[in-house]
Amino acid sequence: MANHPDDEQLLRRAFAVAQQSRAQGDHPFGAILADKDGAILMEQGNGFSAEGHDRTAHAEKLLATRAGKAFSLEVLAQATLYSSAEPCAMCAGAIYWAGIGRVVFGQTERGLKAMTGNNAENPTLDLPCTVVFAAGQRPTEVVGPLLEAEATALQADYWASRG
């Protein structure tokens, strides 16, 4: 699970997408997809509000669905999904099925759960994405948590205000 030279820069771009998502009235989560050379292919913010209060409209799931339609398995196997927070079990499944070969995330799912508590808009699962990926038949490399303090700061006051 080696870091690539652009991992921090690209993860910070996912953080910026999360900030944009919040500024547009949605949950502060963001994801980007980069090719093997670090070129950004797609960006996606959380879609909870934009998708009519769809609790399954997580940034990573929406991005994985779009990517699976737009790119070949060969391209996606060498691509990296950068996410402001660790992909939940649902998102990890979507990433796996789309064929994305690498994930880099900021805040852990466990840390997010501790922060959100029992919030109906985000009933966080304390299940590491590595557990989901390990059950698959193709490898998915995971790097994270990376820049965890910055990632956690994106959520710091948001969930407290939603309590």
Image (cartoon, helix red, strand yellow):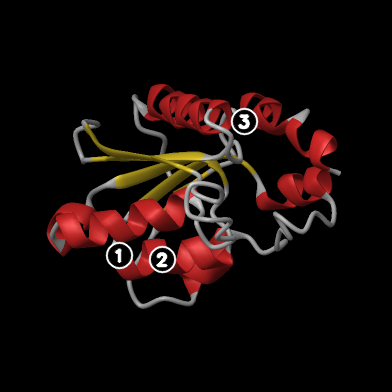
State left or right for residue 78 relative to residue 131: left
Residue count near mark 3 (Cα–Cα under 10 Å), binned few <14, some 14–19, many ≥20: many
| Residue ID for mark 3 | 151
Whichever of labels 3 and 2 marks the residue nearer the N terminus, that label is: 2
5 vs 42: above or below:
above
Q: Residue at x 82, y 47 (%)?
A: 114
Q: Residue at x 56, y 34 (%)?
A: 146
Residue count near mark 1 (Cα–Cα under 10 Å), binned few <14, some 14–19, many ≥20: many
Number of marks present in the image shown:
3
| Residue ID for mark 2 | 94
Q: CA distance from mark 3 to mark 2?
A: 22 Å
State left or right for residue 117 relative to residue 158: right
Mark number displayed over residue 98 = 1
Residue in the foreground of this view, choosing between 118 and 35? 118
Q: Secondary structure at mark 2?
A: helix
Residue count near mark 2 (Cα–Cα under 10 Å), binned few <14, some 14–19, many ≥20: many
Question: CB atoms at circles 1 and 2 under 8 Å apart?
Answer: yes
Mark number displayed over residue 29 = none
